Amino acid sequence: MRQYWWKILCILLLLYTFIAGFLIDVPDIGNLNQTIRNLFFHVPMWFSQLVLITVSLVYSILYLRDPKPKYDLYAWQFTQTGTVLGCLGLLTGMIWANYTWGTPWNNDPKQLGVAIALLIYLAYFVLRNSMTDLDKRGRVAAVYNIFAYFIYIPMILILPRLVESLHPGGKGVEGNPGLNGGDLDPTMRTVFWPAVVGWSLLGVWMTTLYLRWKILEEKKHPL
Amino acid sequence: MARTQINHIWALVKKDFLLEIRQQYTFYGILLYIASTIFVLYLAMGQEPEDKVWNALFWMIQLFICINAVSKSFLAESKGRMLYFYTIAGARDFVLAKLLFNVLLMVIMSLVSLILFQLLLGNPVHNPLKFVGIVCLGGCSLSLVFTFLAAIAARAQQNAALMAIMGFPLIIPQVLLLMRIANTAFSDVIQSDLLKIVLMLVGLDIMVIALAVILFPFLWKD
């Protein structure tokens, strides 16, 4: 049975994000002005990227426990959508940085983190596509995916301690005053968390559509 | 059980050393690689670089040395021999032996390149003993990550280029941490969180070993 309640939820949440995100009163903080609304688009994309690569990690572990081709396809596709959302997050972040910090690229640890994530997962695609044997491809790709994930997560925890950050909660002196990761304004929080869920669901939806297409294609042209 | 395991690992490491001594191909190959890279660097720089540049160059050269030193470790084994090791020693012992051997090899290579750096590019290091310690730790960290990636690349029947693609993004946390603590050896300034960073590095190393031990059997199952 195909469930569709969560797709409706996704649309509603994203509609809410777009409407409320542009209309609610936002706190006026320093040089951020109205660009603070980008928080509802830029940050949730990161969150959903993390969600998607975590889902992919779960499928990679499942594949190693029980090598069904389905799991390999799922793991691959979830990282792909995650990478797309990562690129979108990077773009929105760069536009935002251009207006508030002066330049699109500031060597900020979070920017570095996402650049590294993109490199890691692009390498994953290269690695996976370099093999033709299905069974071996699945296993090697899953092993790399798990290995990369467990290095990537400590990295995004360590990096901010080493490099000066402009992001809220960072070490830099020019960080946005008042807006810390911990004390997000209550009115903004009412839009922010629904936005996170909405974008994540959109990522899952995109992935399932692509997966259905892939599975149909494989049925039509069996190897 | 633990005893036989140690025996297995020891035997495999000894085998790698014997091969190295008899063939004398990889070892001298990498030595020559180190010498020529640093020599080219010396000619290209023309003068002694600043501390920061020295540090950055040193760790970058370590990265490339590590890729070259480690990449062959799994490709050299033929399929039949792999199967043989797999049946007599098991995948875990095999990967632990490879990790140990590569760590030793890389520590030697790091020290050699440190000596060459000192000779050709000047000596900005104020605290030599500390820096040697950091270099050894760095050699271990780099070789652990790249050994596992070499196993993946060998399985995918790919060359060292794929290893570099996979490895460079994954090695960044270690390299940044290493550069950070290496900087403390260039001046007499005492950095308070030195111990914390060293512990973080050791923690990362232990995690990489654990991941290698857990994941390697899946990689080599046929």
Image (cartoon, coloured by chain):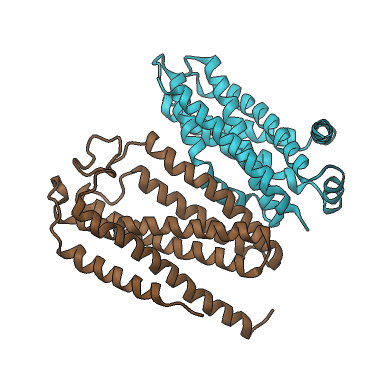
**Residue visible at 76% across and 55% down?**
B221
> Residue A40, located in which quarter of the rendered image?
bottom left
For this orientation, the residue located farthest to the bottom is A220
Q: Quadrant of the C terminus of chain A?
A: bottom right
> Residue B145, located in which quarter of the rendered image?
top right
Residue B164 spot, x, y in % from top left: 58, 48
Q: In the rendered view, tell whether residue B210 sits above or below residue A13.
A: above
Q: Tell me the shade of chain B.
A: cyan
**Residue visible at 37% across and 42% down?**
A109
Residue A28 spot, x, y in % from top left: 12, 50
Residue A62 spot, x, y in % from top left: 62, 60
Q: In the rendered view, tell whether residue A148 sits above or below residue B39.
A: below
**Residue visible at 45% across and 77% down?**
A3
Residue A22 spot, x, y in % from top left: 18, 64
- In the depicted view, which residue is nearer to us: B146 or A110? A110
Q: Image check: B152 left or right of A56?
A: right
Counting the numbered discs, the total is: 0
Query: Which chain is brown in the picture?
Result: A
| Residue B39 in view, yes or no | no
Q: In the rendered view, tell whether residue B180 sits above or below residue B131.
A: below
- In the depicted view, which residue is nearer to us: A72 or B63? A72
| Residue B164 in view, yes or no | yes
Q: Image check: B204 left or right of A31?
A: right
- In the depicted view, which residue is nearer to us: A40 or B137? A40
Q: In the rendered view, tell whether residue A154 sits above or below residue A72.
A: above
Q: Image check: B19 left or right of A24?
A: right
